[in-house]
Image (spheres, helix red, strand yellow):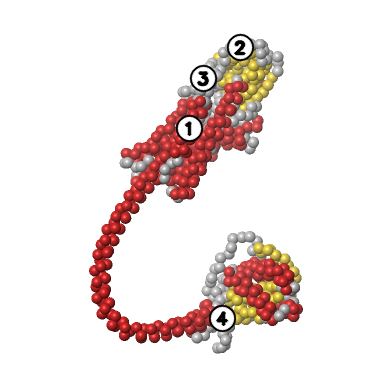
Amino acid sequence: MKINKFYSLSLLFLWIPIFLTAQFPELPAPVSGNVGVQKIYILVDSVRAYDVETIRRMPLRKTFSLLSPVEILPTEASQAYWMAFRIANKSDSTRKYFLDFEWWPYVDVYGTFSHGQTVYQKTGHLVPFSQRVYPLANRNLLPLELPPGEAVDYLVKLALDRSAKAIPVDLQFQLRSPEEIKSWELTTTGLVMFFTGIFLVMFFYHLFVYFSTRDSDYLFYLLFLFVLINIPAHNFGYSVQYLGAFDGFSSFVQKLDVFFSFALGTTMLVFANVFFKTRERTPWLWRISLAVNALSALSLLPMLSGNVVMANMLIGNISLAGILVILVIAFHSWYKGYPSAVYFVFAQIFFIAGGLITVLAIVKAIPTNIWTDASVPAGASMQNILLSFALANKLNVLRKKNEANQMEIIHQMEENKKLQDKVNRELEQKVSERTRELDHVNGQLQMTNEELNQTLQIVSEERRKSDSLLLNILPETTATELKEKGTAAPRYYQLVSVLFTDFADFSRLASRLSPEEIVWYLNYYFRAFDEIIDRHGIEKIKTIGDAYMCAGGVPIANESNPVDTVMAAMEMQAFVLASKEKFRKESGVEWNLRIGIHSGELVAGVVGTKKFAYDIWGNTVNVAARLEEKGMPGRVNISAATYELVKNHFECSYRGEIQAKNISLMGMYFVEKEIKKEPIQNQPKQV
C-alpha cells in the first residue's frame, strides 16, 4: 500500500504556522518603566504556621528577607512561602496587567491599595476552576488594574501540595499585559485545533487502512493515536477549562497528567514491539519491554495515597527508560535490515526532541513560550508522520515479497505441469491397453449391475419413506427404539409442561364456513403452531378437531420446559392476534384462541401394535385441559404449579381458583409479559 502523496504533503505543509508562532514574547517581573514591582520580600513558612493576620502584624523588614524569587528552591510539599511587594503606576493613564503564578497549586493574594481598599484573590492548579478569579485554561492569572499614580501592596501566599503533579523550581512570577494573555489564548486555541486535527486525520486514515488490511500493527498504532488525540488540549491546559465545571476536576487533572504519561509511553512501547515482532525475533528486548510496562503500572501506586509528585517523578523516569528501549529496538532492527526501521528511528528522535524542550522549559533552562508549550505535540506530529511512512513502507515490502513469491510459485507450477503432462501421456497409454482388456468383462457385468442398482434404489426409497412416516408420527428416540426392539416402553417423567389450545366458539365459526374453509384455517394455524413449538423444543402430541395438544420436557427431559412452553404459548397468541383482523375482514369471522398450561408428572409412550401414536397420560394432562376450558380468548392461563416455575421469567396476574380432578382447589394465573433476562439453555438429564 502506498501512502497518498497529498495526505503526506498536506501534513508537512501544516507545520508552517508552528514557525510563525514560535517566538512568543516573555514579560519578566519586575517590569521596567512606569509600572513595575519595586521590591520583593520573602518569608519561608516551613510548617504553614502563619495566617494572613499574623503576617500583617509582623515587622516586614525584620521577619522577611529581601530576595530574588529565583533564589528560593521549593523542596517540601508541606511548606508555604509568603511574598510581600508593591506594584505602582507612575504613568498618567490607567494600566491593566495580570499576575501569572505558573506551576503553583495554591495561590492566595491579599492586596491593599494606597487609597485603603483591600482585595482578596485566589487561584492555583488545585483550586476549583469555577473559584478562580480569572479562569483561563490551567493558568494561574490574577487581574490587576491601577489608575494613574496608584499603588498596591501585595501579600502573596504560595502553598505546595503532594497531590500536585510537580514542585515549582522557584518563586518567580510574571507580570503580563492583557494583550499578551489574549494573544496566548488565541494562539494556543489555534495550536490545539491544529494538532488535534492532525491526530484526528491520521487516526481516521489509519482506521480506514486497518479495515482494508486487517493488519494488527495498525490496531495497536490506532490505540497509541487515540491517547495522543487528547494530548494537545491537555498540555495547553484546556482540559481543565472544558471539564472544570465538575467538582474536584482541578485536583483530578493532576492525576490525569500522570495517567497520560503512562498511557502514552505504554502504548508506544507496545506498538514498537508488535511492529518489530520482538517476541519472535528478539525475545530479550520483548522481556525488557514487559518489565518497563510493568514498572510503569506500578508507578501509578503512589497516586492511591495522594502522592502525585512521586507518581509523576516515577512515571517520568520509567517513560524515559521506555523511550530508550524503543530506540534500542529501532536501531537493532535497522542494523538487522528490518524494513521501515529507519523511519522508526527518526520518529523517536523527533518525539524525544519535543519532550526534551518541554523538560528544559519546566526547569527554566530555556525561556518558556508557545514553542516550548507546543514542543511535545509538535514532536509527536512529526513522529506519527514518520510512523505512517514506516507502516506504509512495511506493507509495500510485504507486497513486493508476496509478488516475488507468487512469481516463484507460478514458475514452479509451470515446471510441475510439464512433468505432469509427461506422466499423463505414459499413463494414458497404459490405461488404454488396460481398458481394452476390461471392456469385455464390463460388458458381461453391466446388465447384472443395472438390475441390482434398480433393486437397491427401490428398497432404499421404500425404507426412506417408511422412516420418514415413522418420524412424522413418533419422536425420534421412540421411533429408533421401536425399530431396534420392536417395542417402545412407556416412560415416567417427573416434570412435563402440557399445553392445550382450542378456538373459542368454534361451533359458531364452523356453521358460518364451508368444510373446505374450516380445514384451510385450522391447517393455517396448526402449521404455525408446529413451527413455534419446534423452535422451543416442545413435542406435538395430537390434534382433536380444533384442539391442539403439545408437551415440553418429553421425550427428552429437561428443566427449562415450563419457560419454553409458556414462551411458545405467548407466540401462539401473538400469531393468532396478528391474523385476527385480516381474517375478520375476509370471511366475517374472528378466531380467538384459549390456552391452558399445567406442569407436573406424567407417563409418555406408545401403546398397542397397530397405528402407533405417541401419547401422554396422567392427571397433569387433565388439569391442563381444565385450565384451557377456564381460560379466556387471547390469554395464556397457567396453573399455580407452572407459575411457581416461571414467575422469575414472566409477569403474571392471579385470577382465582378451580376444582381439578383428584386435586383440591388450584390457583390460576394469566401470563402478562416476559421479564427480559438471559435465555435459559436446555439442560437434558437422564430419566
Quadrant location of the C terminus in the rendered image: bottom right
Q: Based on the displayed image, in which of its 4 quarters is residue 510 positioned?
A: bottom right
Closer to viewer: mark 1 or mark 3: 1
Q: Callout 3: helix, strand or loop?
A: helix
Q: Position of residue 168 (x, y in %)?
A: 52, 26
Quadrant location of the N terminus in the rendered image: top left
Say left or right for 28 vs 149. left
Q: Amino acid at mark 1?
A: Phe
Crowd rating for badge 4 (residues with CA inside 10 Å; few <14, some 14–19, many 20+) = some
Name the residue beneath numbered marker 4. 473
Q: Amino acid at mark 4?
A: Ile
Q: Position of residue 202 (x, y in %)?
A: 49, 40
How far is the residue under mark 1 from the one under mark 3?
40 Å
Residue 483, placed above or below residue 393: below
Q: Earlier in the sequence, mark 4 or mark 1?
A: 1
Q: Earlier in the sequence, mark 2 or mark 1?
A: 1
Q: Nearer the viewer, residue 194 or 324?
A: 194
How far is the residue under mark 2 from the one under mark 4?
109 Å
Q: Which mark is residue 70?
A: 3
Q: Which mark is residue 13?
A: 1
Residue positioned 42% across, 84% down in the render = 454
Closer to viewer: mark 2 or mark 1: 1
Residue 256, placed above or below residue 459: above
Q: Amino acid at mark 3?
A: Val
Residue positioned 51% across, 43% down in the render = 204
